[in-house]
Image: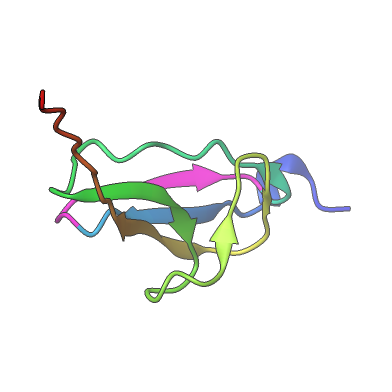
């Protein structure tokens, strides 16, 4: 086994799609605690972090990291429905 001083860390970069990019250092096989983006996107809801730009390979809290990688925020268009009650 490698001594703790020779274990090379991995780096996880978070790209929220809003111009904010943050990088953290993680140890091999360390469970990750995923952040929530600081910003918001009008009419969109944050759905999680993915390994691909098209948002098909989600990463979850507690997943272990075994490589340096970039995670991309997945935003889905949010819909709202308004009901108006009127007296007849």
Percent position (x, y) of residue 20?
A: 19, 50
* Residue located at (42% from left, 50% from top): 47
What residue do we see at 30% from left, 40% from top? 37
Residue drawn at x 24%, y 51% as measured from the top left: 44
Q: Residue furthest right?
A: 1
Left of 68 or right of it: where is 81? Answer: left
User: Magenta residues, as a range?
Assistant: 18-27
Residues 3 and 65: in front is: 65
Q: Give the image location of residue 81, x and y in percent.
A: 24, 43
Quarter of the image with the C terminus is top left
Magenta residues: mostly which secondary structure? strand
- Left or right, residue 45 beside residue 49: left
Residue 22 sits above or below residue 56 on the image: above
Q: Is residue 21 visible?
A: no
Quadrant of residue 27 in the image? top right
- Considering only vertical position in the picture, is 14 above or below 67? above
**Does residue 20 belong to the magenta stretch?**
yes
Percent across and percent down for residue 51 are 50, 67
């Amino acid at each position: 086994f490698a001594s703790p001083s020779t274990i090379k860390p991995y780096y996880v970069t978070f790209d929220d799609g809003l111009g904010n990019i943050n990088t953290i250092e993680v140890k091999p096989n360390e469970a990750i605690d995923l952040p929530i983006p600081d910003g918001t996107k009008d009419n969109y809801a944050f759905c999680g972090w993915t390994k691909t730009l098209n948002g098909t390979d989600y990463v979850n809290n507690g997943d272990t990291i075994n490589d340096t990688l970039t995670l991309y925020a997945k935003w889905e268009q949010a819909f709202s429905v308004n009901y108006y009650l009127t007296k007849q």
